[in-house]
Image (tube, helix red, strand yellow):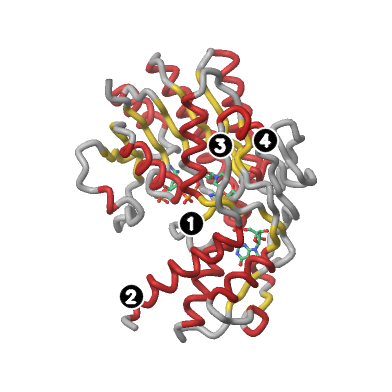
Amino acid sequence: MTKRAFITGITGQDGSYLAELLLGKGYEVHGLVRRASTLNRGRIDHLHPNSELHLHYGDLTDGVGLVNLIREIEPHEVYNLGAQSHVKVSFEMPEYTASTDAVGTLRLLEAIRAADIDCRYYQASTSEMFGATPPPQNEASPFYPRSPYGAAKLYSHWVTVNYREAYDLFAVSGILFNHESPRRGESFVTRKITLGVAAIKLGVADELHLGNLEAVRDWGYAPEYVEGMWRMLQHDVPQDYVLATGKGFSVRQFCEAAFAQAGLDWEDFVVYDKQFERPTEVDALIGDPSKAREVLGWEAQTDAMALARLMVEADLEQMARLIGT
Ligand code: NAP
Ligand code: F7E
């Protein structure tokens, strides 16, 4: 039997890697795409044409649309990756962030319940829910979100747990620490840095403006994390897992490694810019992924320093092609 999966956020970093993974496993993949005035499918263009990939217009803020889609597709697995995922932007658009990242989850869970189908559900939870709780953080650590994004995701986390307990839905929540790749959105700090390094190295920029360099994150490699999501839905028992590398590095250290990869000294180019600070910061996130290792056999293979190298190389290559050097 061909398995059908439905992915919200298929045009995003994780959605694109997950679609690749599932198509490779023989799934029929359905993805939710938002209507925009220009096409925003750059991350999944390479998957076309593929008769097993089906895209549907919709939005997590449109409950009726979700009800109709779930009824029509009857997916065996739903991966809810769609979100306004930028922490700083969530301070500027708190209500929209809540509607998409919190109530959007509820709308999707209700659509699954209304369709009365046998379906497994994955919720994209985040280490941002730990916020001010000091590291290392694991599944038992207390939550203390520090942004409208973190608070919205915490609602989604708990409502997923509740639908599992109340309605016996096979629902799991993956508490994922930061994960990056050459497909990472350009305004997240790792990609901003590696793009900045490439631009400086190729002579199209001469400085890079950043905010807080002291924040510590546990950065892993996105393709490895989508494999973890899939494994969570294949297990016999629905439960929640942390995915992380277990290693923390500061933004400063990531900068150092990224500039060094291009033979540059970061201190010559990085300029502190207050506009990139947040009203409340999350100082340090370092995950303890023991449960995922023991139960799912999942382990991160790529740490932040390796990521800095591979992302700089990818951006150098891409930018050199763009500017024709
Ligand atoms: P991303 O690259 O920002 O992608 C977000 C996706 O959500 C895009 O496809 C976007 O569509 C879609 N989206 C945004 N608003 C929507 C709405 N109202 N309705 C439907 N879709 C909407 O994010 P990512 O890095 O792949 O992350 C995937 C998920 O994991 C997100 O939920 C994120 O919050 C969560 N997460 C990410 C990390 C991380 O480090 N990457 C860690 C923990 C959790 P457009 O392309 O049209 O904008
Ligand atoms: O910031 C600092 C910033 O925006 C990381 C999302 O995927 O991971 C991501 O959220 C750190 C913060 O990611 C700049 O203050 C300094 O301390 O790359 P980021 P994030 O906020 O950790 C979590 C797990 C998610 O769930 C989210 O969806 O870097 N920082 N200077 C900067 N950050 C940005 N963006 N830009 C700067 O110029």
- Per the image, label 2 sits on a secondary structure element best described as helix
Q: Look at mark 1 in the image and give the residue it sits on.
A: 181
Circle 2 Cα neighbour tier, 10 Å, few/some/many (<14 / 14–19 / ≥20) = few
Specify the quadrant of the image occupied by residue 250. bottom right
Q: CA distance from mark 4 to mark 3?
A: 9 Å
User: Which circle marks residue 321 in the picture?
Assistant: 2
Q: Quadrant of the C terminus?
A: bottom left
Tell me which amino acid carries mark 3. Trp
Q: Nearer the viewer, mark 4 or mark 2?
A: 4
User: Which circle marks residue 290 in the picture?
Assistant: 4
Q: Residue, x 67% and y 64% (percent of image)? A: 251
Tell me which amino acid carries mark 2. Arg
Q: CA distance from mark 3 to mark 1?
A: 18 Å
Q: Position of residue 205 (x, y in %)?
A: 50, 83
User: Which circle marks residue 298 in the picture?
Assistant: 3
User: Which circle marks residue 211 in the picture?
Assistant: none
